[in-house]
Image (spheres, grey):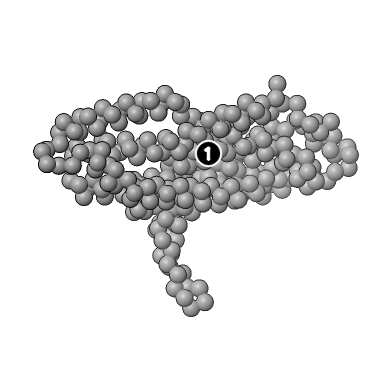
């Protein structure tokens, strides 16, 4: 029998926003707008009108946040899957080396990794005599992909280890090689186990992309700060940042709901 009798969920940090959070954000935003309007001087534009004026620019910054999250997730997943498979290798040097890389980047502060990538990666490269600049957002994407790679490696290792030993023994009895067992029997079962925590990891990565503002990337947080500096109105501070927070919530909440739905769908009793 090569079918799983249970699905074990790898233990991962949970990012699960609820509808209550959205309601709280709406209430807080309304209260902050009301308080800011009370502080607005005569002749100045209203708070909502000012926020709406800056919305197209903030939307461009938010789009960069999403692009960084997509690319970092793709790079981290592509690198993390083979790294996780190496963690179950029968070769001690390969197994130990992949474990060290996984633990090092998994337990490193994301902001520190961002700074290292910004400082160590070149600002431009020479390709066939042509100077090609490397913008800061690409280096930030590489920096964020490193912890994603490590967490993805641990997801793969945990999913493989959660497959009952009888699966390996039954396949071995049928004369499958270790490679065939892994690629034809074990990994296909791991996809369902890894999908919900993989989506959860993407949500965590998305809400971490504003860290790029610290290293000078012109994403949504940076542009919000620039808009506040341009307006020079202290009463705009709380409403503008709550507006940005609501944008991240609106994007991440469906992901959280889809993750919960997949967990229920893939659960086997």
The residue depicted at 14 percent of the width and 42 percent of the height is 44
The residue at 48%/42% (across/down) is: 205
Frontmost residue, 218 versus 227: 227
Residue 69 at what x, y percent from top left? Answer: 48, 47
Q: Position of residue 264 (x, y in %)?
A: 62, 26
Q: Nearer the viewer, residue 109 or 145?
A: 145
The quadrant holding residue 190 is top right
Give the residue at the far left of this rendering.
42
Give the quarter of the figure containing the N terminus: top right
Horizontally, residue 164 falls left or right of residue 202, namely right
Residue under the image location 37 percent in, 35 percent down: 246
Q: Residues within 10 Å of mark 1 (few under 14, many from 20)?
A: many
Q: In the image, residue 58 lies at what x, y percent?
A: 34, 47
- Check the image and report above or below for 20 versus 111: above
- State the quadrant of the C terminus: top right
Occupied quadrant, residue 183:
top right
**Residue sitting at the far right:** 174
Mark 1 lies on residue: 201
Toward the viewer: 101 or 83? 83
- Disc 1 is placed on an element classified as helix
């Amino acid at each position: 029998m090569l079918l799983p009798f249970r699905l074990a969920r790898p233990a991962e940090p949970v990012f699960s926003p609820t509808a209550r959070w959205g309601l709280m954000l709406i209430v807080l935003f309304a209260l902050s707008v009301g308080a800011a309007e009370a502080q607005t001087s005569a002749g100045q534009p209203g708070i909502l009108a000012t926020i709406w004026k800056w919305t197209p620019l903030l939307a461009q910054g938010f789009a960069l946040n999403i692009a960084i999250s997509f690319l970092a997730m793709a790079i981290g997943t592509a690198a993390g899957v083979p790294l996780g498979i190496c963690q179950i290798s029968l070769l001690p040097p390969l197994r130990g080396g992949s474990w060290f890389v996984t633990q090092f980047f998994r337990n490193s502060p994301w902001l520190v990794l961002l700074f290292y990538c910004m400082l160590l990666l070149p600002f431009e490269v020479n390709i066939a005599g042509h100077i090609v600049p490397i913008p800061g957002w690409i280096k930030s994407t590489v920096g964020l992909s490193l912890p994603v790679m490590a967490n993805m490696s641990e997801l793969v290792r945990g999913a493989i280890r959660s497959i009952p030993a009888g699966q390996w023994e039954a396949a071995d009895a049928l004369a499958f090689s270790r490679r065939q067992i892994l690629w034809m029997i074990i990994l296909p079962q791991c996809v369902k186990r890894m999908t919900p925590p993989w989506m959860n990891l993407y949500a965590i990565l998305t809400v971490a992309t504003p860290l790029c503002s610290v290293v000078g990337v012109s994403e949504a947080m940076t542009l919000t700060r620039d808009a506040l500096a341009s307006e020079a109105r202290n009463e705009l501070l709380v409403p503008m940042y709550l507006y940005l927070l609501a944008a991240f919530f609106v994007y991440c909440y469906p992901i959280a709901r889809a993750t919960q739905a997949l967990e229920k769908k893939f659960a086997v009793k």
